[in-house]
């Protein structure tokens, strides 16, 4: 299976995905792209010999125009699976429909709780005992597709959003590769980590 990964920043999740696709793993990375030409993850992917590209979303007046520029390199790479990893742009339903059911995303909350932004702060303010991350299939609705795996962590009394984010990120790095492997093997068993 051919995997393309889209990032917006440092790409720590992208890196774990790249490093997981070795040996008898049924998937191989074919492309890493970003909406930000300065994304630190692009150099990391390049250093691992993965082709990279970027399309600066600020150069485009609309989401549709940006996606029209994002599509050609993706279609050329011909991915079977697209992994969004710290990708901070919302994709239109037209784009999602082109890759229906083959786009994964990692979101730093226990979906369906806290779709959208500032997830850790919201969990702390709600007094939740647990927080975590979810990998889900991307649909036209933000952070709403079928959940393929979750990792749970405790919320500690003096947690800030930074300390909680750091604890969750460690689990994201375990969760995403595990979900990608099962997804690439067409194994529908959900990945459930922590507690
Ligand atoms: C992570 O918190 C992830 O949950 C969110 O983007 C953040 C940064 O991810 N999607 P990465 O280090 O760029 O992979």
Image (cartoon, helix red, strand yellow):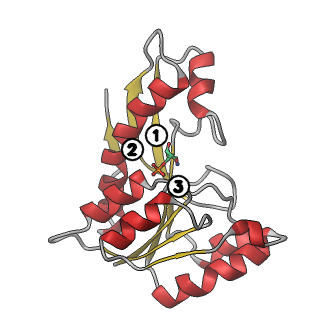
Describe residue 23's horizontal placement relative to residue 106 as left or right: left
Q: Position of residue 69 (x, y in %)?
A: 68, 81
* First-in-chain label (1 vs 2): 1
Does the beta carbon at disc 1 come under 8 Å from ligand 1? yes
What mark, if any, has residue 105 been given in the picture?
none
Q: Is residue 186 above or below residue 12?
A: below
User: Which quarter of the image is occupied by the C terminus?
Assistant: top left
Measured Cα–Cα span from mark 1 to mark 2: 6 Å
SS of the residue under disc 1: strand
SS of the residue under disc 2: helix
Q: Residues within 10 Å of mark 2 (few under 14, many from 20)?
A: many
Circle 1 is placed at which residue position? Answer: 133
Q: Residue 172 appears in which quarter of the rendering?
A: top left
Q: Residue at x 54, y 87 (%)?
A: 75
User: Which quarter of the image is occupied by the N terminus?
Assistant: bottom left
Q: Is residue 192 above or below residue 138?
A: above
Does the beta carbon at disc 2 come under 8 Å from ligand 1? yes
Does the beta carbon at disc 3 come under 8 Å from ligand 1? yes
Q: Position of residue 159 (x, y in %)?
A: 48, 16
Q: Residues within 10 Å of mark 3 (few under 14, many from 20)?
A: many
* First-in-chain label (1 vs 3): 3
Q: Residue 72 appears in which quarter of the rendering?
A: bottom right
* First-in-chain label (2 vs 3): 3
Task: Identify which residue, 49 or 90, lies in the foreground.
Answer: 49
Measured Cα–Cα span from mark 1 to mark 3: 18 Å
Describe residue 11's horizontal placement relative to residue 117 as left or right: left
Q: Residues within 10 Å of mark 1 (few under 14, many from 20)?
A: many
Q: Position of residue 56 (x, y in %)?
A: 67, 70
Extreme-bottom residue of the structure: 76
Circle 2 is placed at which residue position? Answer: 172
Q: Is residue 166 above or below residue 40?
A: above
Q: Residue at x 53, y 68 (%)?
A: 101
């Amino acid at each position: 299976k051919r995997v393309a990964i889209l990032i917006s920043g440092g790409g720590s999740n992208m890196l774990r995905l790249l490093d997981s696709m070795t040996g008898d793993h049924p998937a191989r990375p074919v492309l890493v792209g970003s909406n930000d030409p300065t994304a630190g993850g692009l150099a990391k992917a390049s250093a691992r010999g993965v082709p990279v590209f970027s399309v600066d979303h600020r150069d485009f007046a609309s989401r549709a125009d940006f996606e029209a520029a994002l599509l050609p390199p993706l279609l050329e790479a011909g991915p079977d699976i697209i992994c969004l990893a710290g990708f901070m742009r919302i994709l239109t339903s037209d784009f999602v429909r082109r890759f229906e059911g083959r786009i994964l995303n990692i979101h730093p909350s226990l979906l369906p709780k806290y779709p959208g932004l500032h997830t850790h702060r919201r969990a702390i303010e709600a007094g939740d005992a647990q927080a975590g991350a979810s990998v889900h299939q991307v649909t036209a609705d933000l952070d709403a597709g079928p959940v393929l795996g979750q990792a749970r962590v405790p919320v500690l009394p003096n947690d800030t959003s930074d300390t909680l984010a750091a604890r969750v990120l460690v689990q994201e790095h375990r969760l995403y590769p595990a979900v990608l492997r099962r997804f690439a093997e067409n194994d529908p068993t959900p990945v459930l980590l922590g507690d």
